[in-house]
Amino acid sequence: MSDATAVAADEPEVPDIDLPSDAFDAVLDALADREPGDSLHFEGFSVARGAGSDRDDESDEDAPDEYVLANGDRQTGLSERDLHEALDDRAAAVTDWYAFERVVGEFGPRRAFLRWLEDADGATVATRYAALDEGIERAWGELKITATVTDRGERRYDVRHADDAGVQIDELDAYDDPLDARELVTLDEKGRYRPLKTAPSLAGGWVFPDLGPRDAYEAVETIYPATVANWHREREGELDVTHWRETMARQSGIYGVVKTWDRGEGHEHVDWVEEACCDDSQCLKRREWQYDDETELDVDGGDGVFPCREPCSVVVSAARKWTRLESEQPRTYEFELTPSEKEQVEEIIDAVADGRIDEIREADTKEGANRYRTRFLRAKRFDDEGNLGGVPTGPDEEDEE
């Protein structure tokens, strides 16, 4: 490594990078679009087109373009060949510029996300390239994304389920088309349809082992639609949040009934909906919507890296059902349950609500939601019609009339 690519003592050594011809040609094209003296900046140095203006002999008006390299000291009168050699000594910084300016391009969510993956806005080229050489891992929902760099400074990305971290590629189903992810997110590991793409139920067993920057972004956005876009809007201070009341006011048809669920009782019912649907255990988004512009919900919005800007269709659909159920008048019932049976009913509800039923072993009858123990409770307490044997103690007769 030449002195030009030496790094500070507190920075790691940059891996050997060969400057590809397309990156060098991109530098020449960028300089050709600039006025002489208008520098193109890289980390630690800059390059400008001199057009012979720095030479003492100004008689040769047809002299070819010459280049100026500023890196603390100023080198002038560089030929294209000289410039190529100089930039080859600084290939890491040049390929870093090329990767984001030419390969990724636009200043938007894709560029911001790919730079975030390798902390490009906080770490130096030397630090990042050394880390990329080993592989930089980032989590995005249930995904593990690993960014690496080739000896030509090209970014490559491995996208897989976090549960498959460390699994060899040949042990997984490998894909190279990011649109193949549409099939991977449709069903959970039990073959059940996933209506909510940000639910923590993404099945594993697959990998996109060698994606370029644009394809990596497309794969992530296909698996978790609009999450990068909304994450970027939030970072830019432009996330447009639509709160509960505004969302429900837009509902019509069979969903219009949800608008009737404000009965002067505050927003307690919305807290119940949010606790049921928007907890981290149910959705990987971080809820940013509230009851309205002035009223926050009492339930925590979660810790997800990407924000939720409005109640989703799953929340609206569930709220419609609960609106109808909550319109029923409460009644009081008297049941005979032993203290252990009361605790068992509570344990069954908790296990179902938390999705832990499959974790309870058939032989573990200490668990209240154990299948055999639950069947015993049903056999003991249900009547021949399958009803929990209880006695109404409320004003049932008046309600029925």
Image (spheres, helix red, strand yellow):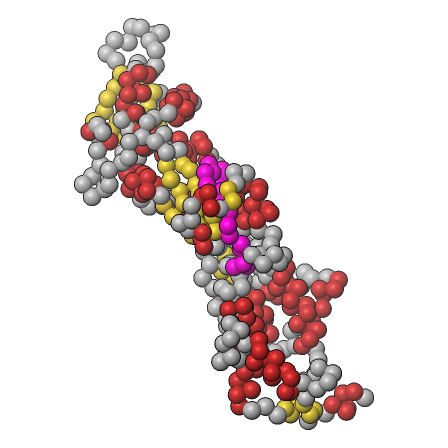
The answer to which quarter of the image holds residue 323 is bottom right
**Span highlighted in magenta in the image:** 198-216
Which residue of the protein is positioned furthest toward the right in this rendering? Answer: 401
Give above or below for 171 relative to 256.
above
Q: Is residue 168 above or below residue 22?
A: below
Q: Farthest residue to the front: give it.
A: 363
Q: Residue furthest left?
A: 9
Residue 360 lies, in percent from the top left, at: 51, 72
Residue 348 is at least partly visible in this image = no
Q: Is residue 101 above or below residue 305?
A: above
Q: Residue at x 18, y 41 (%)?
A: 9
Residue 334 on the magenta segment: no
Residue visible at 28% across and 9% down in the picture: 58
Quick check: is 199 in the magenta stretch?
Answer: yes
**Residue at x 55% of width, y 70% of height:** 357
Asked whether 101 or 183 is in front, the reply is: 183
Residue 41, x across and y down, in percent: 33, 31
Q: What is the quadrant of the C terminus in the image?
A: bottom right
- 209 with respect to 9 (left or right): right
> Which residue is pictured at 52% across the width and 38% down the height?
176
Name the one closer to the observer, 229 or 46.
229
Comparing 345 with 317, the one in front is 345
**Residue 170, percent from left and from top:** 46, 43
Query: Is there any visible trace of residue 33 in the rendered image?
Result: yes
Counting every numbered tag in the picture gives: 0
Q: Is residue 354 left or right of residue 375?
A: left
In terms of image quadrants, where is residue 383? bottom right
Query: Residue 342: where, in percent of width, then height?
Result: 55, 86
Q: In what quadrant of the picture does the N terminus appear?
A: top left
